[in-house]
Image: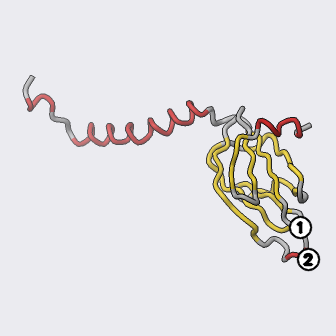
Amino acid sequence: MTLRSLQCGPGAVVLAIALAAFAPGCAAKRFLGFGGDGTLLVRHHESAPQEIWLDGELLGVVDSAAVACFRETRTGTLRVEARAATAASAPHSLTRATSVVLPPDQPRLWDVDHDQVLDGRAFLRLCS
């Protein structure tokens, strides 16, 4: 085999680059199981109830010192936001926002107070 036989044309190079960029994304989705529904739990101790938004979609309202369960949410890497839900505390003002990786079959708990995303399996009993 000579060096000349290993050379590729421009079309082959473009195809190789496209496959290299596309394959890791597919493998990651398959490995993490994205595509099904996920479960997001949220807790906070803010003085006002908080609206929980996931990628611009309102999931619901969480009262202070409570854990809310949102089932059948989209999976993947998503932006989650907590916003004040009452007029007394500047309605819809952003309390906190973060990025969360939400896979199916592995519930996640977002602790708004500490801005942490944790394994939520211990709180699944609250989802009834």
Question: Closer to the N terminus: mark 1 or mark 2?
Answer: 1
Badge 1 density bin: few <14, some 14–19, many ≥20, Cα 10 Å: some
Percent of width and height locating residue 115: 69, 58
Q: Quadrant of the C terminus?
A: top right
Residue at screen point 72% across, 32% down: 105
Up/down of 127 relative to 44, above or below: above
Q: The disc labelled 2 sits on which kind of residue?
A: Ala
Q: Quadrant of residue 58?
A: bottom right
Q: CA distance from mark 1 to mark 2?
A: 8 Å
User: Residue 4 vs residue 78: left or right?
Assistant: left
Up/down of 52 relative to 85, above or below: above
State the residue in front, 35 or 91. 91
Q: The disc labelled 1 sits on which kind of residue?
A: Ala
Q: Secondary structure at mark 2?
A: helix
Q: Identify the coloring.
A: secondary structure
Residue at screen point 88% across, 39% down: 127
Q: Quadrant of residue 29?
A: top right
Residue at screen point 82% across, 53% down: 43
Quickly name the residue at label 1: 48
Percent of width and height locating residue 117: 69, 49
Query: Given contact means CB atoms under 8 Å apart, are the residues at marks 1 and 2 in contact?
Result: yes
Percent of width and height locating residue 21: 41, 42
Up/down of 81 relative to 86, above or below: above
Q: Secondary structure at mark 1?
A: loop
For this orientation, the residue located farthest to the top is 1
Percent of width and height locating residue 100: 65, 50
Q: Which mark is residue 11?
A: none
Up/down of 86 relative to 123, above or below: below
Quickly name the residue at label 2: 88
State the residue in front, 39 or 114. 114
Q: Quadrant of the N terminus?
A: top left
